[in-house]
Image (cartoon, rainbow, N blue to C red):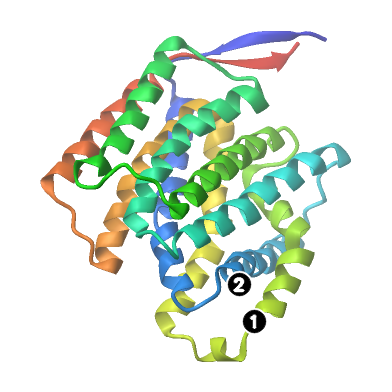
Amino acid sequence: MSDVDVATPPASHRDLLGFALGFVGIAIFGATLPMTRIAVATFDPWFVTLGRAGIAAVLAASLLLVLRRRPPPRAAWPTLAMAALMTVIGFPIFSAVAMTTVPAAHGGVVLGLLPLATSIAAVVINGERPSALFWVWSLVGAGLVLAFPLRTTDASMGAGDVFLVLSVVAASTGYALFARAGRWVSGWEAISWALVLMAPVTVTGSLFLFRPDYAAAPGAAVGALLYVAVFSVFIGFFFWNAGLAIGGVARVGQVQLLQTFVTLAVSAALLGETIDGTTLGFALAVMAVVLLARRAAVSRRSAA
C-alpha cells in the first residue's frame, strides 16, 4: 500500500454536484449568525449552544432508529468525536459569545476566512493538495471578503472578533473531519452519529441550564433557537457534508465565500441592516472568484 496523488479534474459534473450541494448547505448556514444573535438576546449563550445541539441530537437519534442504521465501525468514532467537538460545541459557543458583542453582519464578514481555513484543514487533515492557482484565488477571495467591512469601519479587533476567529478554526477543522469520515458513513449519517455521540453532554447540559423564565421566551427567540437546532446543526450538514465528500474539501469549501453575503441578506431582512450597491458589487466579485477557484486543479491523496 502506498500513497499516490489522484488529480481531480478542473471541472466535471461530479464537481458541479458537489458545489450545488455545498451551496445549499451554505445558504442554510448563512442564517446561523443572525438567528444566533436573536436567540442570545433572550437565552444564555451556553444554553443556545447546548440546547440547539440537544434538540438536533433527538432528531438525529430518531432518524437513525427509524431507518435502522447500524453504528459506524470503531475506526470512525475518533474522527466523528473530534468533528462533533469542533462543530457541535466549538463553533456554536464561540459564535454565540461573539454575537453578544458584535453585529451579525460583522460576524458574517469575519467568517469570510472560513474558505481559506477550510482549504488549510483539507491539506493538513485530508491530504488534499491544491495547485498554486487555487491558492491564489483563495487568497483573492479572502482578501475581497475581509476588505469589504474596512470601507466603513476601523480595523481594530475586539473580544468578539477573537471568538469569531476561534469559531472559524473550529468549523474548518470540523468540516475536514466530517469529509474524512465519509470513508465510513454518508454525510447525513456522519452528522447524525456525531450529534448522538455528544447527546449525553448536550441534552443533560441544556436541561441543567434551562431557566423557568425561558418558558415565556418571545416567539422570535424560540424560532431562532429552533432554526439553529434543526437547520444549522442538522439538516444543513446533510447537504454540506455530501458536497465536501463529492467535490473535495478545498474546492467546495470556496463556496463559503458566499456565506458572508447570505448572512448580510438575512441580517437585512431580520435585523434591519442595509445592503447597498457596493455590497452587491463585492458579492458579484466573490462569486467570480468562486467560479475561478472551482476550475483550479486540486490533487487528492488516496491509497493504492
Pick the residue in front: 304 or 104.
104
Q: Element under label 2?
A: helix
| Quarter of the rendering occupied by the C terminus | top right
Q: Is residue 42 left or right of residue 202?
A: left
Residue, disc 2: 47
107 w.r.t. 118: above or below: below
Q: Kindly check if marks 1 and 2 are in contact, taking CB atoms under 8 A apart as contact.
A: yes
Residue of label 1: 210
| Disc 1 to disc 2, C-alpha distance | 7 Å
Q: Position of residue 180 (x, y in %)?
A: 68, 33
Q: What is the x, y in percent for residue 264?
A: 29, 53
Amino acid identity at mark 2? Phe
Quadrant location of residue 46?
bottom right
Left or right of 158 in this view: 54: right
Q: Earlier in the sequence, mark 1 or mark 2?
A: 2
Which amino acid type corresponds to the residue marked 1 in the rendered image? Phe
Q: Is residue 109 left or right of residue 150?
A: right
Mark 1: few/some/many CA within 10 Å (<14, 14-19, 20+): some
